[in-house]
Image: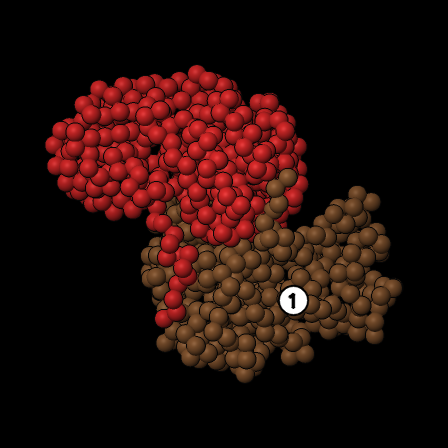
Chain colours: A red, B brown
Amino acid sequence: MPKISEKAGIMPASPIRKLVPYAEEAKRKGRKVYHLNIGQPDIHTPEAALDALKNMDLKVIEYSHSAGNESYRRKLAESYRKIGVEIDHNEIIVTTGGSEAVLFAFMSCLNPGEEVITFEPFYANYNGFAISAGVTIVPVRSYIENDFALPPISEIEKKITPKTKAIMICNPSNPTGALYSREELMQLRDIVKKHDLFLLSDEVYREFCYGEEHFSAMELEGIRDNVILLDSVSKRYSMCGVRIGALITHNREVLAAALKFAQARLCPPGLGQIAAEAALDTPKEYFGEVYNEYIARRDFMVNALNNMPGVYSPLPRGAFYSVVKLPIDDSDRFAQWLLEEFSYKNQTVMLAPATGFYFTPGGGKNEVRVAYVLKIEDLRNAMETLAEALKVYPGRVD
Amino acid sequence: MPKISEKAGIMPASPIRKLVPYAEEAKRKGRKVYHLNIGQPDIHTPEAALDALKNMDLKVIEYSHSAGNESYRRKLAESYRKIGVEIDHNEIIVTTGGSEAVLFAFMSCLNPGEEVITFEPFYANYNGFAISAGVTIVPVRSYIENDFALPPISEIEKKITPKTKAIMICNPSNPTGALYSREELMQLRDIVKKHDLFLLSDEVYREFCYGEEHFSAMELEGIRDNVILLDSVSKRYSMCGVRIGALITHNREVLAAALKFAQARLCPPGLGQIAAEAALDTPKEYFGEVYNEYIARRDFMVNALNNMPGVYSPLPRGAFYSVVKLPIDDSDRFAQWLLEEFSYKNQTVMLAPATGFYFTPGGGKNEVRVAYVLKIEDLRNAMETLAEALKVYPGRVD
């Protein structure tokens, strides 16, 4: 039997999805499992998007342009211009989810063995795409003690080597909920400019900023050809399943390169593009409601967590996650124990061990990521259950 | 400005799509362009698929399982069993088009620098995926003189090195329309077994075999863990835009590896999966009609081509393409000239220069790929136009 590749060997299994069999087993036992582990919101997809699908009058679902339908790109460019990001529709490549945008950016910008700096804890799948593209992730640690703020510039510069080609940020951040201020982004701009690096900015949670304006990396002056914006409609319109994202940049060489990778895979999903284009007409009230709902959920959850002895959650300023410190020995063990051995009122919770978001071995052992994607009534039960679990968990550490 | 990657530099632009600006210009001049250049059938997508989308009652378009919806995989496995391919739903990973299945197969099976043998002319995008994965394509030439049959085993074995990890076939073949017989596949099986290679079998045109039964690589005995089937619904149901394919294998290590790549990109398109699952209920008559239509188109086109002086087209036994020899100096120049300078009755044709399907420099210079995806009335006009063009093309070579 021929051997599989080395890449396949080092490719990490999803840190979240590996707990799925335990959750399934708990459900088989009749337990209610509250999913705080995954960023699948329960918010409805906008009617405009669903209606567009129901009212399609296509006879043939054809290939679209490799960069995405022009009508969609034009409307998308317009929507960016409304938030102060000046781009042309030819500077957009529609991708299969934000995932493909990350992969295209890595493959277009970095050679195998070259390095991309990112801030730990970070979205676990960045590592999967880095392995796919053969590039190396170099993490710079951020700390829960200062709410996962951008690490000091001096710490970032220490990690720059001749192989460094890019800095990657997720703003607001999955998994931490941190939101980088204009000042922090200006500091990044200075490093990017000084060392002539790419700045890959994943802004898929842009609409989810609580009380502060989002400042896009595309608004940074003087590094026009360095910035690549990575975007997705998944969270914005609560339609993760359509798999529509975008790679956006003023850099013509990167655009031409990414388009070649895009041409090889022919086109992004056609039906998803129909939904995404229609979703651009979603009325403002939708976002207002969603925004208020998330603020209420966040406040409820963070308050509940910080009332549990030994627990600390920062107040997330964006996205819909928090990385939370728990009085436990090992977050992987704890997450599994919750599903396998614990129940309270015949219910339990599923958490994402934060170890999956750290690159440095040992990082996140007493932290978990929680997503506040459930309605408050469910969050209340989930928090009550978690509080009870922490009281009796055999690996509790104070 | 930071430099783009070397991969991006060597990545080929789509050999078909690079002519698009000339076609657009011809249309702006008011010319009718017959598209023989691309495998976008005009056949209607089955009603079952379109109805499923119109009748969706989803409120949230959620992520699906990374391997695809279980309900779809179960029905798909059943449909394979009906054609003699015994697989379980857990041996299927639903991918974003056949494209992603090829990429996952390369990344799961081959290390950067390792080699995959395939038969020239071959589907151009294999090379794009090979570059993405860092693997090397080693072509073995097949010839129009013997209708692009499988090259002799001795020619294949000459190309096997310690770096050879896989053989890849497209059966029936895009671009040539060749269909490998059971005997040819048995020969491949022997090589694969002898050298312990993977056999990657792209069978996306399986339903398009004219007068002969399709024999799947999955039916080969004794190489159960070597075969990886790459599939797609694009052509089968004339819905290229949904981007749904599959990677199928009995090899558990490859499945586990591919699943990790699948998890990193979260899931295949959700709406496309709904369409693809519903399409499995397409009545047999649909395929009967499609089949008869393609046979009629093929026969009409091949006859018309072979009646033109100096032109030779094999009779394709599968798919809906033919690689055709023309009395011309340079197929890229000819294809561009057709769009830029020629018109007959205010119409012209767009062809795919076969150079894009050859890896060896110079291959395909007097060949083009034509797709018979237009109705006969249009094909008649297209053939008449091509015949006139060949009479006056300044680079005609006899």
Residue at disc 1, secondary structure: loop
Looking at this rendering, what residue extends furthest in the top direction?
A211
- Look at 15% across and 33% down and name the residue there: A396
Q: Position of residue B219 (x, y in %)?
A: 41, 72
- In the image, what residue type sits under mark 1? Tyr
Q: Position of residue B8 (x, y in %)?
A: 60, 51
Q: Quadrant of the N terminus of chain B?
A: top right
Residue B46 visible: no
Q: Position of residue A213 (x, y in %)?
A: 49, 19
Q: In the rendered image of this protein, does residue B80 appear above or below residue A33?
A: below
Chain identity of mark 1: B
| Nearer the observer, A156 or B364 | A156
The residue indicated by pointer 1 is B358
| Nearer the observer, A189 or A388 | A189
Q: In the rendered image of this protein, does residue B203 appear above or below residue B48?
A: below
- Look at 84% across and 68% down and name the residue there: B396
Quadrant of residue A333 within the rendered picture = top left
| Nearer the observer, B139 or A30 | B139
- Look at 46% across and 48% down and name the residue there: A136
- Look at 81% across and 57% down and name the residue there: B337
Residue B228 visible: yes
Q: Position of residue A384 (x, y in %)?
A: 19, 25
